Image (cartoon, helix red, strand yellow):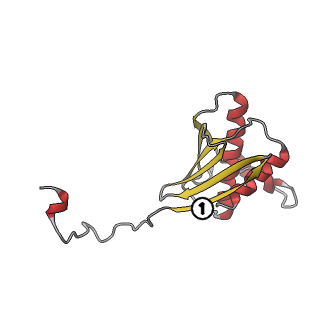
Amino acid sequence: MPLSMASSNPQPLDASFLTIPYPAKTKQAAGMVDGILTNVMAVSFADKILVTIIQGGRLAQWIHVPLGSVDPSHADHYLPTDADDNDGLLPMPHLTPKTLLGGSTPERETMGQLYATQIASAITTKNPQESRTVVVGLGLSNAKASREAFFDLLELVTHCL
């Protein structure tokens, strides 16, 4: 019997199921980065946060960064820290990006992983309890970015987070 004919009054199998908002929370922003129109979209799924950065209508590289908790055996938390340092701009050391697709040249892969780690750091800074994996899709026109373009792109992304 087809599912649509099975029952006119369907009941949930278990009342303790998790209610997930549908559709997934989505934010978009667009702006000029290094003279190129750049579109950014962030979608918050139940298990992942997807961030796409598109220039020229393309997506050429996919990177994921598990947020998870900090590994207690990680040595960096034993090093002295100084709150007056300008380390707030550095990505968190426990984040480990992995290129899933793309990154055809070492420069493109390095730049993509830098962006992905910086985006994951921004998400973790905004919500330290966040543990979902961040997936970043990049479609950047240039593998190399000036300092100004780098910060402009990250500012555009933070409007979506």
Q: Nearer the viewer, residue 37 or 46?
A: 37
Depth check: give the residue in front, 17 or 153: 153
Residue depicted at x 61% and y 40%: 58
Toward which corner of the image does residue 131 lie, by quadrant? bottom right
Q: Position of residue 84 (x, y in %)?
A: 88, 60
Q: Relative to residue 83, is residue 59 depicted above or below?
A: above
Q: Is residue 96 left or right of residue 18?
A: right
| Residue 67 position in % (x across, y down) | 59, 52
Q: Residue at x 87, y 56 (%)?
A: 85
Seen at 30% across and 71% down, the residue is: 15
Taking the image as drawn, is residue 1 in sight?
Answer: yes
**Residue farthest left in this picture:** 1
Give amino acid for label 1: Lys
Image position of 6 (left or right of 150): left
Quadrant in the picture for the C terminus: bottom right
Q: Position of residue 24 (x, y in %)?
A: 49, 61
Residue located 64% across and 32% down the image: 103
- Residue hosting label 1: 27
Question: How many marks do you count on the picture?
Answer: 1
Q: Secondary structure at mark 1?
A: strand
Q: Residue furthest top?
A: 105
Residue 74 seen by the camera:
no
Seen in the image, is 129 located left or right of residue 47?
right
